[in-house]
Amino acid sequence: MFWLAGVLILFFGLLVSIALHELGHMSFAKLFGVRVPQFMVGFGPTMWSFRRGETEYGIKWIPLGGYIRMIGMLPPRRGDAPGQVRQVSTGPWQGLIENARGAALEEIRPGDEERVFYSKKWWQKLLIMFGGPAMNLVLAVLFFSILLMGIGRETPQPVIQSVSKCVVSASQANGQCPANAPLTPAAQAKLQAGDRIVSFDGHKITSYTQLQGLIRDSAGRTVAIDIRRNGQDVKASVPIIRNKMADLKDTQKTVEVGFLGITPTSAYVQQGPGAVASTMGDMTGRTVGALVNMPKKMVGIWKAAFGNEKRDPNGPVGVVGVSRMGGEVAASHDLTTLQKVSVFIGLLGSLNLAVGLFNLVPLLPLDGGHMAGALLEALKKGFARLTRRPDPGYVDVAKALPVTYVMAAVLVVMGGLLIYADLVNPIKLNG
């Protein structure tokens, strides 16, 4: 039951994010007077819908996205009246363009001439199309703000959770001490779980990060430490030994540093707005990098789906995989309730950031493709004003339909591949 609850939480969380994405588009469309006949979450046959005013709102059976339908997304040819569809002798691609143009213009009714998308000013079209991704970016900021400023970031504290009994290599770290294994410095000094280290080698300790750095820099020395244990102050001397450990800057490397032999406790520490901005910047950089490397990543998805390769935990994941992650988190016995809530909020923030940035890619049928058309229109109009030439009018995005159809087919194939890989070889959070 916990697994199913986790699946549903993330699944419906993603659907709500999609609905809000479309609401971002529709809000600006209605603000600028564009007629919106449909607002739908999902694709395919309609499961449920209702009509309010001139717009039908509903849910469709295939929950893999959503859309709003605005009239006049494709403009008429130059010289054609609004709603006019002339038959022309064309090649296959031109025929495809004209058929799509005709279908788009057929729903324009008398009196809709000023309510079509293509007739709006370039900046209005830009805002309409940016409204969707902007909503996802705002949601990402909201989720990360709740996570970092509300709940806080799980941060190691200078309080001992456990003391390692003996010094062993990483390959021998199985909880058992060999007969000839030396005691750790912490065990020699009789440090205990619950001890708070308040001073180390004369330095007042304010964070575990500070303490960790001091321990690593004290290899081969006996150091005086002050401890608070059950409300009492205790002093001790600890001989810090040398040990090979992972480099803090590059965990793939090992370095010989000072070793004490303690595991710290963790506590949630609330962060400020700066932490939210830093996290958004870091996550944005990673997401953009992932989008740039998407073709290479999809090769790995193919090999994982139809071969024996393990899924890349940092690779792309579809709605099925995200939902399965939610189930895995909810059913985990190793996470506290607060940790589970934090993971859910972090995942929803990351998903909204990814959806927002992906839709900004300047290729049709993505929102970024329409935004690119609006910006191109602005450049053409600006150049015409500077050179005192006639207004060039709107950009005919219908001419890009062949590329749009190819891109749409690629997205469908990628989505199908991700769903299949998420079913047969899912990413597991626990490795």
Image (cartoon, rainbow, N blue to C red):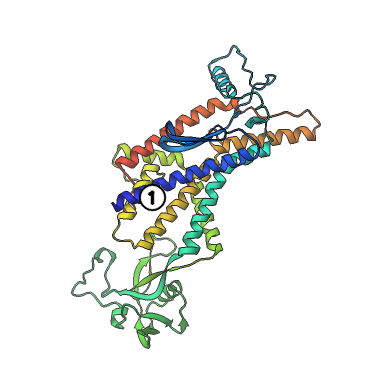
As drawn, the residue found furthest toward the right would be 388
Question: How would you rate the neighbour count of disc 1 (Cα within 10 Å): few for under 14, some for 14-19, many for 20 or more?
Answer: some
Residue type at mark 1 is: Ile
- Residue 312 visible, this orientation: no
Position of residue 428 measured from the top left corner of the image (x, y, whole percent): 32, 50
- Residue 226 visible, this orientation: yes
State the image quarter where residue 199 is shown. Answer: bottom left
As drawn, the residue found furthest toward the top would be 89
Q: Is residue 74 above or below residue 428?
A: above
Q: In the visual, does 225 lie left or right of 400?
A: left
Position of residue 196 measured from the top left corner of the image (x, y, whole percent): 38, 80
Q: Circle 1 sits on which residue?
A: 9
Q: Is residue 147 above or below residue 427?
A: below
Instruction: Name the residue located 36 percent from the left edge and 67 percent from the top edge.
Output: 245
Instruction: Name the residue located 37 percent from the left edge and 36 percent from the top edge.
Output: 417
Disc 1 on helix, strand or loop?
helix
As drawn, the residue found furthest toward the left would be 179
State the image quarter where residue 121 is shown. Answer: top right
Q: How many marks?
A: 1
Position of residue 59 measured from the top left corner of the image (x, y, whole percent): 44, 37
Q: In the visual, does 414 lie left or right of 423?
A: right
Q: In the visual, does 126 lie left or right of 341?
A: right
Q: Is residue 246 above or below residue 406?
A: below
Q: In the visual, does 185 lie left or right of 342?
A: left
State the image quarter where residue 341 is shown. Answer: bottom left
Q: Is residue 380 above or below residue 146?
A: above
Position of residue 288 measured from the top left corner of the image (x, y, whole percent): 51, 47
Instruction: Name the residue located 51 percent from the left edge and 66 percent from the top edge.
Output: 271
